[in-house]
């Protein structure tokens, strides 16, 4: 072992041209993992732990204003009745349900119309053609009869107490413009589904806790977020040309100095892709949305008033740079394997994990454990999925790397101002046990 370590150290020393590249590829994910763990743990002990873990607990609210639940739908014939039925059972005294059928090509519109006699709270909007989620949200926001808009996806099953947990942030602070919920995975019948259970705790939950501790959140979860209509009106609502309207609206809010909060008790159960092709398409779109927002908001560095947004901007841009640097390392390794005459300074003999790879992998698994322990307050059997997380450092880092690299040229080549319309979503492999 010592001989291998000496040889490995000498190999790094001999490749001075690549040393900064290797250091960045190694240290960046290690540094960020500890940032997320420290920030997430601080959030839990400072804010979250004082709330009851009882699944039937509700916060005490000074009032119960009307809430409009907005559900944009495109080709959701398999899910929309289940979603509306669950929404009608919400434990809140005053709310309405607005479903937007955005030019669906299946029976979504027909099913929604058939539900109207059964659910007096339900209102249905039919759009003649597919205009995109942002247009659907904007249309519903115009006709909504309340100040508070809870926007969810067409497959989302909300916890019965979700409205109260989200609404408390608005009622206790006039500066809050949006609050995002805590998505939980329903589709768990395959390895991809099981891994995503841990991923959503680590990437969605822990990082949002940490970002909230540090002051700003990169994005609300489009699958479940409540907005103050006054704030939406000030920022011009959702942008139809953005691939990920949830990321964009989060930045529009915060650059106008509205606060965006995270509420871990606002649980929402969602369906996710369980095929490689479906997961690839989804993650490329997410990566494109993030890059698109960074390109839109980079001029904010000229404004000192936007300084609180700088850290999350720098972090995301750095993650894009990291993905491309890692891709460069893999390319140089493949080039070395195929062309023995590659210049010595660019020679990469192996990408197999050494001691540094073990440290990064261990830290990643530690981050997953911390996040899943926190979220196990709300999902009692969550930790039994930890055994599947051994695949996460390889499978999902590679997925994140490749989708980010693929997304960058797509964004650069995409026409400016082109409308972001829907494609039929991949909702995974449904089982009877998927229902929470």
Image (tube, rainbow, N blue to C red):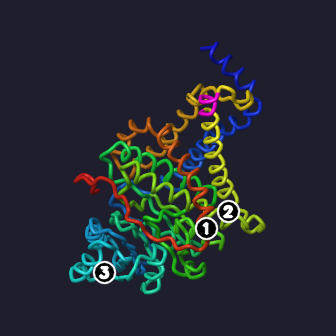
Q: Which residue is mark 3?
A: 122
Across and down, in percent, residue 108 comes to 29, 73
Is 155 situated above or below 35?
A: below
Q: Which residue is mark 2?
A: 309
Magenta-drawn segment: 334-339
The circle drawn on residue 345 is: none
Residue 338 lies in magenta, yes or no? Answer: yes
User: How far separated are the C-alphas under marks 3 and 1?
Assistant: 31 Å
Across and down, in percent, residue 167 comes to 46, 71
Is residue 279 in view? yes
First in sequence, mark 2 or 1: give its number. 1
User: How far separated are the C-alphas under marks 3 and 2?
Assistant: 38 Å
At mark 2, the secondary structure is helix
Tell me if 113 is positioned left or right of 128 in this view. left
Say which residue appears at 55% left-offset and 69% top-offset.
242
Q: Quadrant of the N terminus?
A: top right
Tell me if 89 is positioned left or right of 204 in this view. left
Q: Tell me which corner region of the image, top left, top right, bottom left or bottom right, holds residue 154.
A: bottom left
């Amino acid at each position: 072992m010592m001989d291998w370590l000496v040889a490995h150290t000498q190999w790094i020393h001999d490749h001075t041209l690549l040393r900064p590249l290797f250091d960045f590829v190694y240290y960046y994910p290690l540094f960020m993992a500890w940032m997320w763990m420290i920030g997430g743990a601080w959030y839990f002990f400072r804010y979250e732990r004082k709330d009851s873990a009882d699944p039937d607990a509700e916060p005490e609210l000074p009032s119960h204003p009307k809430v409009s639940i907005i559900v944009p739908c495109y080709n959701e014939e398999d899910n929309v009745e289940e979603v509306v039925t669950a929404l009608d059972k919400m434990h809140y005294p005053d709310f309405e349900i607005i479903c937007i059928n955005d030019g669906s090509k299946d029976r979504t519109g027909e099913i929604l119309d058939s539900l109207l006699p059964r659910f007096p709270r339900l209102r249905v909007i039919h759009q003649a053609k597919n205009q995109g989620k942002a247009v659907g949200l904007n249309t519903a926001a115009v006709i909504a009869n309340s100040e508070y808009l809870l926007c969810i996806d067409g497959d989302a099953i909300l916890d019965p107490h979700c409205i109260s947990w989200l609404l408390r942030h608005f009622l206790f602070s006039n500066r809050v413009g949006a609050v995002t919920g805590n998505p939980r995975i329903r589709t768990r019948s395959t390895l991809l589904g099981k891994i995503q259970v841990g991923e959503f705790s680590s990437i969605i939950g822990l990082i949002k806790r940490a970002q909230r501790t540090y002051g700003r959140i990169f994005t609300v979860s489009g699958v479940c977020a409540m907005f103050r209509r006054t704030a939406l009106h000030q920022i011009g609502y959702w942008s139809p040309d953005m691939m990920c309207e949830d990321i964009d609206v989060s930045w529009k809010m915060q650059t106008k100095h509205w606060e965006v909060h995270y509420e871990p008790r606002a649980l929402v159960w969602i369906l996710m892709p369980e095929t490689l092709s479906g997961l690839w398409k989804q993650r490329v779109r997410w990566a494109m949305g993030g890059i698109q927002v960074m390109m839109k908001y980079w001029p904010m560095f000229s404004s000192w008033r936007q300084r609180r947004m700088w850290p999350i901007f720098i972090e995301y841009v750095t993650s894009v740079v990291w993905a491309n640097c890692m891709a460069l390392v893999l390319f140089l390794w493949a080039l070395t394997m195929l062309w023995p005459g590659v210049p010595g300074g660019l020679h990469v003999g192996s990408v197999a994990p050494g001691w540094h790879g073990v440290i990064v992998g261990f830290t990643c698994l530690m981050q997953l454990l911390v996040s899943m322990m926190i979220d196990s307050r709300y999902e009692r059997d969550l930790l039994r999925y930890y055994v599947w997380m051994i695949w996460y450092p390889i499978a999902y880092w590679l997925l994140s790397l490749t989708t980010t690299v693929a997304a960058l040229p797509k964004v650069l080549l995409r026409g400016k101002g082109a409308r972001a319309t829907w494609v039929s979503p991949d909702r995974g492999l449904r089982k009877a046990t998927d229902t929470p």
